Image (cartoon, rainbow, N blue to C red):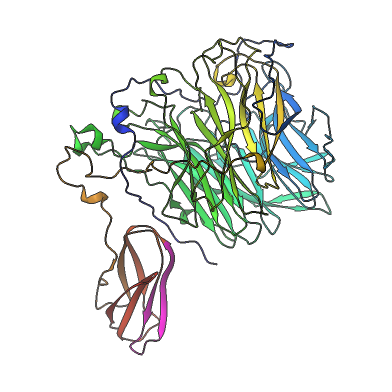
């Protein structure tokens, strides 16, 4: 089985925004607790909903259900809406059926090709557990919906479960739970699942283990399963595989429609000592890199074959008293991302970063954010989809726990054109349009790319709703938890909750309200391809470019392309070969005899900039002189080595 090689990306470009931030005031970052039961005020309908004339709405909306539980996910949204080959739209959401959402279930609805809902403006319960939610879905086996969620049965802990409909669009679900995870006889509860079927109809599920304690380290877990249409049963692997450690609920999974490829992405804490589970250390929910695993054949996954996509440069106190340089990178990945594989089999990752001043404790200027895009096709580049790094003076007010100004990206593609679309959530930070509780309202934006993600149009606000200033509970109009189907068939298919009191009530922000769940269709002809988002924002700092810096930091300068002498040399039978790349490259490192015949391939694939050391084992070769050759595009270097047995 061929695994994708490690890719190390270190883009060294001018420092961003720090010069603006060091003189600005700071506010505490809200710590997300993960609490699911909150005693908060309640406002019952009917509401004095502000009149919306619809002139700013792009596309059409219909109500497909309701919920008292407005926040559908704490981090990565995942896919809550999909379109099957038979033309049906499928939706799932977490329905708090009463005020306070003490009764909470997963609901499902459909819209057929004629526009008729399966359960008009209501949906239908998927499970009958004591409590369930945080659901995503995929559709396979001829239009059967497979919602994944976590539920609570007799055991007080929650566990991942997957439902399967008896027949397409029937709404009669059988529920199956994967094996539970135990460690030292303690149930680890893998919850918050994301699900995707691959081209062989194997379901891929990634979930997160929760301690139930804020800022405690968590683990991402993976399991696969298969559905038998003859018995209506789902069979899972015998146990879960460990993906990696995190402090966020950000993992996502994508599969290819044209091959066996599968991709995973998740956040990983950069804090020292991680993943110490003793609870004695302080862990950050916002100081993260993004890790990615790409597997070509989907067999026997090895999550230690990941690569660090972002490689943020941590603070270096050696530069003090120059705080500007000492902070190094001032961006970090936050708690959401989306991974997607396009029709040409390229992997894409969209993610959110927020400001992070490590030497100031990381808690300053937390709400400004940027939505980014990366693709395997252009591995050394990061494109800006939305730059919301503005409103510094507004920073005294919070978007809320788990929230930053621009966030929650969701990628899709129109097969007829190949164009990519990125939907994202954006907070209207107009201080004359805040709720009575002081929270801004969310909007939904869409941006498009006609060149595989190399450039992106400025996002268009498709909802265009405005919350009246000091709107009381029931009078807000705040879109929350948007999700987009990965298939764009001339129309972007989106769903979200309209929160009638801005703020995340499960984090004690605002009031419990009765909210609509909306389906929003946006024809792609209404999404402008220009103007383009300026690509003048770097992901990483560049060292030695700022006034007052004595010299340059050699650690951050790009290395030169080259191939080093193997060591030891002569060798028997193992030696190490080091090579350096000045940019991300597709390379091959091969061994030849003196007749020019290839005798071994040491390594090949995508490697990032910097130095890399690989091991060569000559056990199968005879003693003698050999040539080893590094190729990266048109560049070639060759050296000799001596094997003595």
Above or below — where is 605 with respect to 423? below
- Where residue 271 sits, quadrant-wise, is top left
Residue 218 place in picture, x, y as percent: 49, 37
Horizontal arrangement in the rendering, residue 75 relative to residue 88 (left or right): left
**Residue 217 visible here:** no
Above or below — where is 600 with respect to 208? below
Q: Is residue 595 magenta?
A: yes
**Residue 255 visible here:** yes
Q: Residue at x 19, y 47 (%)?
A: 552
Residue 513 place in picture, x, y as percent: 67, 16
Horizontal arrangement in the rendering, residue 561 relative to residue 507 (left or right): left
Q: Nearer the viewer, residue 594 or 467?
A: 467
From the image, which quarter does the N terminus lie in?
Answer: bottom right
Main SS of the magenta part reads strand
Tell me which segment is drawn in magenta. 589-606
Q: Residue at x 67, y 25 (%)?
A: 55
For this orientation, the residue located farthest to the left is 550
For this orientation, the residue located farthest to the bottom is 595
Residue 305 place in picture, x, y as percent: 47, 56
Above or below — where is 192 with respect to 226? above
Q: Residue at x 41, y 32 (%)?
A: 284
- Where residue 496 sits, quadrant-wise, is top right
């Amino acid at each position: 089985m061929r695994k994708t090689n490690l890719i190390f990306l270190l883009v060294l470009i001018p420092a961003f925004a720090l010069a603006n931030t060091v003189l600005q005031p700071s506010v505490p970052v809200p710590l997300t607790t993960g609490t699911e039961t909150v005693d908060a005020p309640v406002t019952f309908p009917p509401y004095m909903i502000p009149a919306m004339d619809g002139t700013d709405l792009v596309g059409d909306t219909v109500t497909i259900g309701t919920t008292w539980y407005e926040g559908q996910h704490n981090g990565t949204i995942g896919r809550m809406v999909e379109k099957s080959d038979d033309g049906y739209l499928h939706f799932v959401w977490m329905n708090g059926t009463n005020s306070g959402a003490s009764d909470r279930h997963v609901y499902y609805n459909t819209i057929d090709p004629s526009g008729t809902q399966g359960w008009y403006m209501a949906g239908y319960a998927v499970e009958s557990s004591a409590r369930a939610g945080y659901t995503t879905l995929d559709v396979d086996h001829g239009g059967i919906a497979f919602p994944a969620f976590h539920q609570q049965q007799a055991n007080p802990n929650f566990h991942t479960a997957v439902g399967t409909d008896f027949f397409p669009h029937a709404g009669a679900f059988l529920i199956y739970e994967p094996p539970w995870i135990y460690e030292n006889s303690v149930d680890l509860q893998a919850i918050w699942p994301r699900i995707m079927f691959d081209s062989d109809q194997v379901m891929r599920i990634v979930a997160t283990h929760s301690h139930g304690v804020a800022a405690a380290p968590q683990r991402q877990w993976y399991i696969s399963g298969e559905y038998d249409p003859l018995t209506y049963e789902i069979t899972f692997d015998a146990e879960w595989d460990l993906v990696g450690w995190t402090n966020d609920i950000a993992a996502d999974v994508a599969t290819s429609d044209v091959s066996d490829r599968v991709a995973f992405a998740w956040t990983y804490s950069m804090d020292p000592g991680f993943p110490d589970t003793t609870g004695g250390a302080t862990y950050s929910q916002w100081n993260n890199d993004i890790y990615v695993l790409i597997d070509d054949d989907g067999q026997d996954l090895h999550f230690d074959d990941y690569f660090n996509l972002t490689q943020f440069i941590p603070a270096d106190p050696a530069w003090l008293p120059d705080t500007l340089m000492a902070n190094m990178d001032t961006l970090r990945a936050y708690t959401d991302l989306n991974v997607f594989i396009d029709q040409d089999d390229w992997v894409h990752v969209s993610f959110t970063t927020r400001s992070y001043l490590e030497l100031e404790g990381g808690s300053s200027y937390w709400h400004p954010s940027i939505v980014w895009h990366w693709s395997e096709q252009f591995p050394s580049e990061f494109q800006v989809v939305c730059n919301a790094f503005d409103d510094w003076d507004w920073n005294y007010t919070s978007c809320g726990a788990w929230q930053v100004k621009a966030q929650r990206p969701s990628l899709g593609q129109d097969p007829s054109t190949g164009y990519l679309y990125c939907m994202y959530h954006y907070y209207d930070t107009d201080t004359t349009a805040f709720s009575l509780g002081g929270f801004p309202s969310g909007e939904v934006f869409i941006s498009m790319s006609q060149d595989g993600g190399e450039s992106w149009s400025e996002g268009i606000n498709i909802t265009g709703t405005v919350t009246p200033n000091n709107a009381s509970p029931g009078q807000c109009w705040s879109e929350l938890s948007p999700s987009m189907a990965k298939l764009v068939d001339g129309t972007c298919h989106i769903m979200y909750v309209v929160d009638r009191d801005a703020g995340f009530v499960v984090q004690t922000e605002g009031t419990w309200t009765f909210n609509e769940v909306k389906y929003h269709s946006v024809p792609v002809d209404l999404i402008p391809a220009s103007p383009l988002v300026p690509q003048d924002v770097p992901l990483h700092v560049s060292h030695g470019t700022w006034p007052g810096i004595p010299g340059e930091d050699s650690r951050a300068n790009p290395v030169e392309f080259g191939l080093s002498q193997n060591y030891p040399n002569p060798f028997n039978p193992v030696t190490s070969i080091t090579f350096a790349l000045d940019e991300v490259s597709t390379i091959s490192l091969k061994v030849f005899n003196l007749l020019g015949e290839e005798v071994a391939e040491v390594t090949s694939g995508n490697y990032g900039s910097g130095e890399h050391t690989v091991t060569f084992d000559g056990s199968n070769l005879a003693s003698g002189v050999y040539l080893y050759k590094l190729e990266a595009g048109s560049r070639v270097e060759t050296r000799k080595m001596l094997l003595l047995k």
